[in-house]
Every structure is written in C-alpha cells, then in structure tokens.
Amino acid sequence: MAKANVTMDVRKISDQVSVIDIQGEINGFAENTLMDAYTQANAGKTQTIILNFTGLDYMNSSGIGLLVTLLIRANRLKQQLFAYGLNDHYRQIFDLTRLNEAIRVFADEREALAAAEKVLS
Amino acid sequence: MKRSSSVHPAGKPNMEESWQTIAEFAVPSEPGNERRAMEMVAGAVKGLGVPDSRFENLKTAVAEASLNAMEHGNQYNAELEVSIRVSSTPRMLSIQITDSGGDPAFMQEPGTPDLDAKLAGLQSPRGWGIFLIKNMVDEIRFNVDETHHTIELIMHLDENPSAPREG
C-alpha cells in the first residue's frame, strides 16, 4: 500500500496569516497530512492561508478533490486561501477546474503576503 | 517493454496511415502506480515530436486514466495488471489503457464537474479525472467488452492539426 509522499510545514507569518509549504505529491494519500497542516495553520485568528506549491512534485485528480475539501472548510470559517509557486501546467489545471477563481494565485510569496495584508487593512 | 509494428488495434483511425506500436507494458494495480505508468509512457514517447507545451498534458492524462483503471477497473487488486499500449503514426499518438473490467460506471461520460456545486456540497469534491483527461488530449475513446475496459487517448502531434501541411 502506497503512503503519503508529501510533507507540509506550517509557518505562522502573523496571527492572521499562515503559510503551508508543500513538498512532494498531492494525491489521495495526502489527505491526513493536508488536513493536519490546515488545523495547525488555523490556530489563532487566521484569516488567510497561503499554499506554497513551489515544492509540488505531482498532483492528481484526488489531490484536486482534497483542495476542494480544504476550500469548503476555509469557506465555512470565512477564511481565504491563496497560492503561489504553481508551475505552468498546474496553473493550467487551476484554470480548467476554476480553482483559480476560489484560490487566488500569485507569482511568489511576497505578492501573496502583500495581498493578504491588503485584505486585513 | 515490447516493441513491434502492428496495425492499430482499434482499426478505426487508420484510414491513411499505418500505426506502429511503440511500446507495451503492464503495471500492477497498486495505489501510486499511476505515476509509474505515466513515467513509462513519457519515456516511450520521447522523441516522437510531442510539443513541449503538451507533454505534461499527456502525462497527466495517462496518470488519470491509469488511476481510474487501477482503482475502479481493477479495484486495486495488485494481482490484476493495467496494460498500456503506445502507438503512433507520423501525425498522431495513441495510448490505450486497459483494465480487467470492474465497475463500468467510470467509463461513462460524466457530467462536467462544477466547482460551485462542489463548494455548495451538491457534488462530491472528487470526480475530476475524466474531465482532466478530456481537456489534456485531443480525443478519448472508450471500449468495453465482457472482460475488459479500454480507454484510448489520442493526441495530434502537430501543434495545430488543422493547419495546412507542407508537401
């Protein structure tokens, strides 16, 4: 049986903003890792969670399903999900699935953090 | 990996050009093996002129079709293999992915997944596989018999297949 081949480290940028650094594969086996990271990122008064895809090696349709589940949870808490570090192929998949309408995509962390600060101000 | 020349097994798109089998292999139906299938196909088609812009699309389509075959077709029974045949003409590429036929439902044309409906809880968060495949290649065909399901992925090797060709 295959196991999750992904790590997700959480950085608290401020009380309102967290970054999840994703390294590896987002597939069906990543569910526990992703939801644990979300719980950790969610501590405090988090309003924006930024997904760093710079280290993404592979994502399949099950992984897209996990992102939708994450979005549902974030929406319930009126939180925003941002993303950066997606390569051209996964940007295309975000476009096709319209995930880019629900998760704002940025070129890098600096841009994502600036947008998060703007939301807070 | 076997290499041989053959008539295209589907026999249909073979009006003007003969198909050549580039590679055939099989992968056990174990979780995660869709990546193995993807990399094997990627290796087999290198040098066939798949435009760079579409190479990653082809890999994603193969991975998704293999995932479906292993999960739904073979129920992740590791004793059942998913077989893959890569064929080409100078203008087209075909990848046939065959399982031993379990749940036929996934071979049917699904409705288009709707993110809004998923976020509203009206659709499952999953169900993106066939949608992705359809958007990654030029054509997909399904073939079902009593014991096997085959999905065939067709990709044109020209960047713009409708453009006039020289010669």
Image (cartoon, coloured by chain):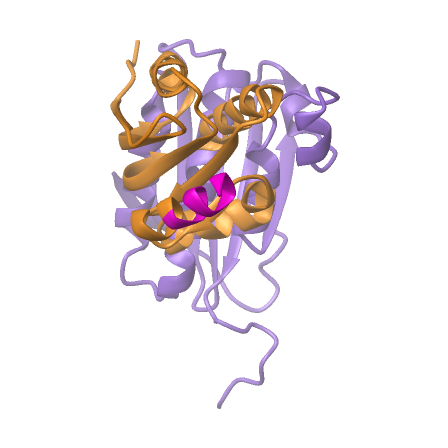
Chain coloured purple: B
In the picture provided, is A115 more to the left or to the right than B149? left
Q: In this view, does A120 lie above or below B120?
A: below
Q: Is residue A80 above or below residue B60?
A: above
In the rendering, at what x and y percent does residue B143 appear?
Answer: 63, 34
Magenta span: predominant SS is helix
Quarter location, residue B146: top right
- Quadrant where the N terminus of chain B sits is top left
In the picture provided, is B144 more to the left or to the right than B129? right
In percent of the image, x 52 and y 66: which residue is there? Answer: B17
Indicate yes or no whether the magenta region holds residue B54: no
In the rendering, at what x and y percent does residue B86 appear?
Answer: 40, 46
In the picture provided, is A115 more to the left or to the right than A71? left
Quarter location, residue A11: top left
Q: Give the range drawn in magenta.
A: A114-121
In the rendering, at what x and y percent does residue B72 appear?
Answer: 54, 17
Q: In this view, does B43 lie above or below B149?
A: below
Q: Which of B32 and B49 is in front in this view?
A: B32
